[in-house]
Image (spheres, rainbow, N blue to C red):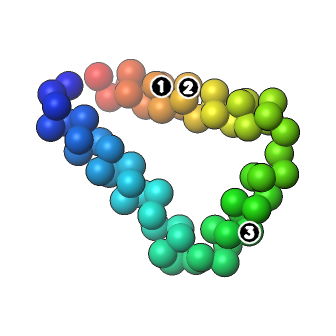
Amino acid sequence: MTGSGWLAAIGLMLVIEGILPLAAPAAWRDGFRRMLELSDGQLRFIGATSMLGGLFVLLVLN
């Protein structure tokens, strides 16, 4: 992947992450508040699952 491809991927990620706070800020705030109550182990599991899901998508696309 070229440098411009990485920048496009980061830009797309930022656009996707910005949709919920723009469309439903109260729901986003509530979800963020609930995430703060999770333990470190739960957050690590969510992060690892998210990373593995992303890697899977990248492998399927290539």
Give the mark nearer the N terminus: 3 vs 2. 3
Q: Position of residue 53 (x, y in %)?
A: 54, 31
In this view, the residue in front, 32 or 23, is: 32
- Residue at image location 53% in from the left, 68% down from the top: 20
Mark 3 vs mark 1, CA separation in Å: 29 Å
60 vs 20, left or right, is left
In this view, the residue in front, 40 or 56, is: 40
- Residue at image location 84% in from the left, 51% down from the top: 37
Q: Is residue 31 above or below residue 48?
A: below
Q: Is mark 2 on a helix, strand or loop?
A: helix
Mark 2, residue position: 52
56 vs 26, left or right, is left
Query: Label 3 is placed on what type of residue?
Result: Asp
Which disc is residue 56 wearing?
Answer: 1
Q: Where is residue 9 in the image (x, y as percent from the top left)?
A: 29, 42
Query: Label 2 is placed on what type of residue?
Result: Leu
Q: Position of residue 30 (x, y in %)?
A: 74, 68
Mark 3, residue position: 30
Number of numbered markers? 3
- The image quadrant that residue 29 belongs to is bottom right
In this view, the residue in front, 59 or 9, is: 9
Q: Is residue 25 above or below residue 55?
A: below
The answer to whether the residues at label 1 and label 2 have Cβ atoms under 8 Å apart is yes
State which quarter of the image contains the C terminus: top left
Query: Label 1 is placed on what type of residue?
Result: Phe
